[in-house]
Image (tube, rainbow, N blue to C red):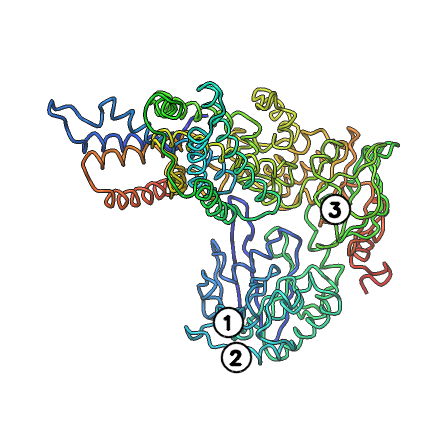
Amino acid sequence: MLECKDLRKHYAGVYALKGVDFCVQPGEVHALCGENGAGKSTLAKILAGVVTPDEGTVFMDGQPIVLGHPTRARRLGIGIVFQELDLFEHLTVAENMMLGNDGPAWVRRGAMDAFCRPYLRKVGLDISPRALLGDIGIAAAQLVAIARSLSMQAKVLLLDEPTSSLTEEAAERLLALVLQLKQAGTGIAYVSHKMKEIFQIADRVTVLRDGELVSNKPAAETSIEETIRLMVGRAVDLSARIESQPRQEVAFSVRGLCSSRLKEVSFSVRRGEVLGIAGLVGSGRSSLGETLFGLHRWDKGEAACGNRKFHPRHPREAIREGFAYLPEDRRSQGLFLHTSVRHNASSAVLNRLSRAGFVMQGEERRIVADELAQTRTKAAADTLPVSALSGGNQQKVLLAKWLLPHPEVLFLDDPTRGVDVGAKADFYGIIEGLASQGKAIVMASSELLELLRCTHRIMVMNNGRVAGILDTASATQEQIMALAAGHQPAASLS
Amino acid sequence: MKLSPPQWLMRFRSVIGLVAICILAVVFSPRAFDGSIIFLDVSNLTDVLRQQAEIGIIALAMTLVIISGGIDLSVGSLLAFSASLTAMLLVKWAPGYSPAAHMAAAVGIAFAASAVLGAVNGGVISRLGIQPFIMTLATMIGIRGLTRWMTDNSNIDFGFGSDTPARFTTIFSDKILVIGLWVAAAVVFYVLLEYTVFGRYIRAVGENERAAGYTGLPIRRVKAAVYTLCGLAAGVAGVLHAARAHQGNPNDGVAYELDAIAAVVIGGTSLAGGKGSILSTVVGTLIMGILTNVLRLRLIDSNGELMIKAVIIVVAVWMQSARKDKA
């Protein structure tokens, strides 16, 4: 029914999709798998009409179609439910559903309610169409988004990680709904990281890696193990491991840390050690870093940096104590995009670069140049705005920014997010170099292979708790994934 | 690194606007009997500077506020407050000091009180997280009320003669002093923004407050400081205003905040925060001043003047954004 041929898309010289074919048949659930950056979301955005492909054609019922605008995609019968729901929490359920639906210019509440009710019933939601979306909870909002697509007569539904923020029970209900829709003849493209889910509902599994199609098989002919292998199977040397050895002294420790998002978190890192943190989005990985950095309050528990008590109430105090936190999202949290590379790099140490309130600009130029060389940042000039750099180089500027305060403990939150393969290798080298200098490093990451490559131990988090701490040398991906999903290892992938 | 022509132009774009408006001013200026261009007469040019000094000084501080991502609507009311307070202290207060000390005390108190009111803006905005537009809209109304209540809603005249109030008006309306104060303030604000840590913090907070938080920057202190400076600047402008108007009028300064904001945006500072410069604000203030001057020399009535100003604001800002897209 919906078919894509040879889709290509590149952003600033980096290919997000390199000739991908994908199709969805009526009454079929076609799962789309791949690591972060494999091209899944680019494909979803193309189908939604948000992004225009550089090359390639999309067919609907055998006819070539031009998307190019969200309204067109909707009219053609393609419904997309994004992971970050495109709904409005201050509007009612019915108002949300009507947006983008062709309706009369005048709002008539009664007619709106009557229009929405059958679709809400179809997705199994028993709520008033007049409830505010913000009040009904994320799981119900997810279903409203699906109901909206159905109300637009979607023949093909693309669900982008629909269960990532749902409880297990809500997720089960959603999967049941997907099967029901499939039986009613809707074609469903299902994007997810959760292998178990995929093999529960999918008829067909497509795997993308680095923007390329690597496999397209009926679910019955493949397995979880094979799919994972295909997802990550790039030319990464799986056997490579960190070589530098941790030292004896404990550099940083946390005991019984509790906050609104964290429950009884305890761990310690030695000098020269890289401690990995694995966990799904929302598992508390980032909350832990932000809390320790003084961005959120913590109610109970204690921490020590070196042999000093550590309880910062503001990032400035954390920095002074020798702790630095490199945030997850460099664009919104890490960098000042329109500001120069130099000023970005020095932004966390300006108080040390000041004499009577004035910035010592010569000194600034010198130390920034040194640090950028250390992190192997490539920039034509450090007076360019940081937005002119590639993702990898931006991330290196961010790293330089947080190395300049000379922290003893460095918390890296997904440091290679949105970074291409070559720059990733650079990062692994830099991280190992920092460890061999004796820094203690905590590194949260969504990529298991990266954690296995770079760390000495891996702490797995689930729902704000420490689910387990494993020795990297003997840890397996299955073990980590099972802990992250909150299962016992034995029951993990069955 | 070599600057390509567009970038080179970009750097001086606001100055180019100023040059263009000067050329237009020369072309459209009426001529005196001897054929000389009245606009270029030294006394006319210095008149422009003196007329713009009050808005100019406020606009300098407003630039910092806007770069930090905020706005200050209370400066017009603050100007009236400062002018009225100065007049009251000079006319109705007889402390028995020497005239010089009396004058210094009156001016000093007016400056300090205005800065304190600015600090109230800054304190509430940074501590309670109230949007700058709303908070300063409230103080714009409130300070106007305070000023009228304080003065019983009446003008306080300085009178003529050789007593302290009259001498105050002579000294503080002196062209050289007024223009000199503006120039000095511009230099101070320029240095503050370009060379100090505080200036860097202002830009950082305005460009991306979230990232500034993750960097550990003192966001609250930065915000409190820019509104305090803005209050102080309005206070200084108020003292000059009282001297020039020869009275303290609690109903003066209405819509001055909008003129100051217009001067800032004509210069090219973005209301979205993070970007802007003192030089461009000075240029923006001059453009407004020259425009007013030429229109008045040609005896175009004030209603026409407002309509032409409106067009200039839109065109100036549109030109800034159009160039930015191309770059």
In this figure, which residue is indicated by the disc labeled 2?
A115
Count of numbered labels shown in the rendering: 3
Query: CA gap, disc 2 to disc 1?
Result: 9 Å
Question: Would residue B5 be visible to someone looking at this image?
Answer: no
Between B254 and B262, which is closer to the camera in this rendering? B254
Residue B317 lies in quadrant: top left
Residue type at mark 3? Arg
Question: Would residue B226 be visible to someone looking at this image?
Answer: yes
Between B20 and A338, which is closer to the camera in this rendering? B20
In this figure, which residue is indicated by the disc labeled 1?
A98
Q: Is residue A362 above or below residue A241?
A: above
Residue type at mark 2? Phe
Label 1 sits on a secondary structure element that is helix
Q: Nearer the viewer, mark 1 or mark 3?
A: 3
**Callout 2: few (<14), some (14-19), or many (20+) C-alpha neighbours within 10 Å?**
some
Label 3 sits on a secondary structure element that is loop
Residue A381 in the image, given as x and y percentages of width and height: 52, 28
The answer to whether tags 3 and 2 share a subunit is: yes
In this figure, which residue is indicated by the disc labeled 3?
A297
Residue A367 in the image, given as x and y percentages of width and height: 63, 23
Residue A243 in the image, given as x and y percentages of width and height: 80, 35
Q: Which residue is found at the position 73% from the left and 57% from the top? A: A228
Q: Is residue A69 above or below residue A412?
A: below
Residue type at mark 1? Met
Horizontal arrangement in the rendering, residue A4 relative to residue B245 (left or right): right
Mark positioned earlier in the residue sequence (1 or 3): 1
Label 2 sits on a secondary structure element that is helix
